[in-house]
Amino acid sequence: MRKKIGALLMAAATAMSFSAQIAGAAEPIIPQPGRGDRLVGQNFAGRSEIIAKNGMAATSQPLATQVAIDILKQGGSAIDAAIAANSTLGLVEPTGNGMGGDLFAIIWDPKTQKLYAYNGSGRSPKGQTLEQLMVRLKEKNTETIPSFGSLPVTVPGAVDGWFALHERFGKLPMDQVLAPAIAYARDGFPLSPFIAKGWARNITRLLEHPDVEEKENARRTYTKDGVPPVAGQIWTNPDLANTLEKLAKGGRDAFYKGEVAKTLDAYMKRIGGPLRYEDLASHQGEWVDPVSTNYRGYDVWQIPPNGQGIATLQILNLIEGFDLKAMGHNSADMIHLMVEAKKLAFADRSRWYADQQFVKVPVARLIGKEYADERRKLISMEKAATNIQAGPMPESHDTIFLTTADKDGMMVSLIQSNYRGMGTGLVADGLGFMLQDRGEQFALDPEHPNVYAPGKRPFHTIIPGFVTKDGKPWLSYGVMGGAMQPQGHVQVLVNMIDFGMNVQEAGDAARWQHDGSAEPTGAPENPPGGELWLEYGVAPEVLEALKARGHNASFRQTHYGSYEAIQRDPANGVYHGGTEMRVDGHAAGY
């Protein structure tokens, strides 16, 4: 028996050595209450990381992960696998994504040894001015863009993103890539537990909401006689299968210039919405240069605004001036510092982030080390700040993330969303998917960079992440969940880089979330200083210490983001995968 226990402990030490090797030396165990003991890895880890050689996928739903692996085994690239998984997720997880939403992606291409980034976000209706929007809001007796119905609808950018990514990096024909999603939509799939809960909550809310102009299509698509499906129930979506088949045969133009676009146009005219055929026909996503900062020797990459990705880089720059490892993992000092850094970055986020085709966003200054040095002086380690203001500049929740990797070394970080769960509540006749409500994220102040304008992309919360080390791919990762995303990105990276956790442990460790910062819509900080929520697993004495520094802090059962990641181990020529244990996530490789 002693020999067996000794062998197990030896194996545990060996497993931990890889994490220390690639992420820096780590303490052997980081105590964390509330989780069970493990013989391999940290005691709080919910599961082991996945290790495979030839390919890997990590998504928020097991069936989608298996679809991606199947595509890789058929000779598909990581992009083919990502598109196949994303199209499947639109069916099996409509609470987070679908063809009615937007897409962003970062891709490591082993042939050119470069990162590529795609901004696949859609624009506001070109035929509706700010003045016309304000009239419609007045008719609804509201001073803000509503969450649901036709007014927050923007052009869906996801399908354009699929075909743009496929054109550059795909190997298999698109009909083969979309075939698994079509088959599941037509033949049926069993609903998974976490998604079933969100499905019921979302569709019930939408079917009861007064801003949703037309509800029968959503009722028919997402319920059976008004009753949402439950976990384990077999569900079909033949309308979605038909729409996907149109894309498989007719390409992107079937969506943006063909029958789908004409159906959307007729539907919007019927319900009085502003989106038109011309908005769809003129849509084009954008290849962009990703931007980065270096954090302790690791280059962390994000897509520049109109998204919030650079908030991650700003927070990392601010906390880099402190020794987090010496503070201790999830200590009061560590959490306090990171929250204060988040407040500073989000003040800038609320003031400066917007569509750069309409305004010049000072990205270089915002993510610069010199600016971080200036702003870092505003952090007090003794007291929580309130009324945070954006820094001076020169003149001038509900999402899916997935990551895939193939045998050639291509790695894909892809995020896609409808916003606010399922989206607007609007399902055009016979299409089988719901339109997004991303336009809610526009500001209405004419002086704000993010103010609504015709043909403009709104501020976006969804952000894919990527990390390189010495010019080579190290980590493709994401953390879903509205404003939690930059906070989650930073926490995962700190767990790996500062504390040496492996790719699964980094996501399993207890998280915190700060809420209430000012918003890019113009909404002010509320309440003063915001609210700090801690996941059970943070020590109770840490909560009390944070309260003593002035944080409005509490333990809270809420959604602390959903995480997936694939890490490259060049020494052994394998991938390490991790996924969110709090939801239906699944990582697999072969």
Image (cartoon, helix red, strand yellow):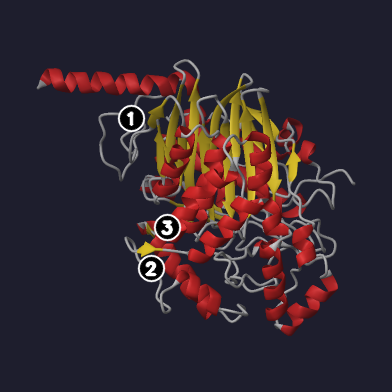
* Image point (60%, 69%), residue name: 424
Give how far across and how far down residue 278 sits, in percent: 80, 64
Q: On the image, numbered disc 1 is attached to which residue?
A: 41
Q: Residue furthest left?
A: 1
SS under mark 1: loop
- Asked whether residue 531 appears in the rendered view, the answer is yes
Q: Residue furthest top?
A: 571
In front: 158, or 415?
158
Q: Are marks 1 and 2 in contact (CB under 8 Å)?
A: no
Q: Residues within 10 Å of mark 1 (few under 14, many from 20)?
A: many
Give how far across and how far down residue 120 sits, in percent: 69, 49
* Image point (83%, 50%), residue name: 357
SS under mark 3: loop
In the rendered structure, the answer to whether residue 104 lies left or right of residue 475 reads right
Q: Residue furthest right?
A: 396
Residue type highlighted by circle 1: Gly
Give how far across and how far down residue 244 sits, in percent: 56, 56
* Image point (87%, 43%), residue name: 394
Label 1 or label 2, whichever lies nearer to me, is 2
77 is higher (above) or lower (below) than 113? below
In front: 484, or 97?
97
* Image point (22%, 23%), residue name: 8
Real-space CA distance between mark 3 and mark 1, rounded to the nearest whole angstrom: 26 Å
Q: On the image, numbered disc 2 is attached to which residue?
A: 229
Residue type highlighted by circle 3: Arg
Real-space CA distance between mark 1 and mark 2, rounded to the nearest whole angstrom: 37 Å
Q: Earlier in the sequence, mark 3 or mark 2?
A: 2
Label 3 or label 1, whichever lies nearer to me, is 1
Q: On the image, numbered disc 3 is attached to which residue?
A: 556
User: Splitting the image into 4 quarters, where does residue 315 fall?
Assistant: top right
262 is higher (above) or lower (below) than 75? below
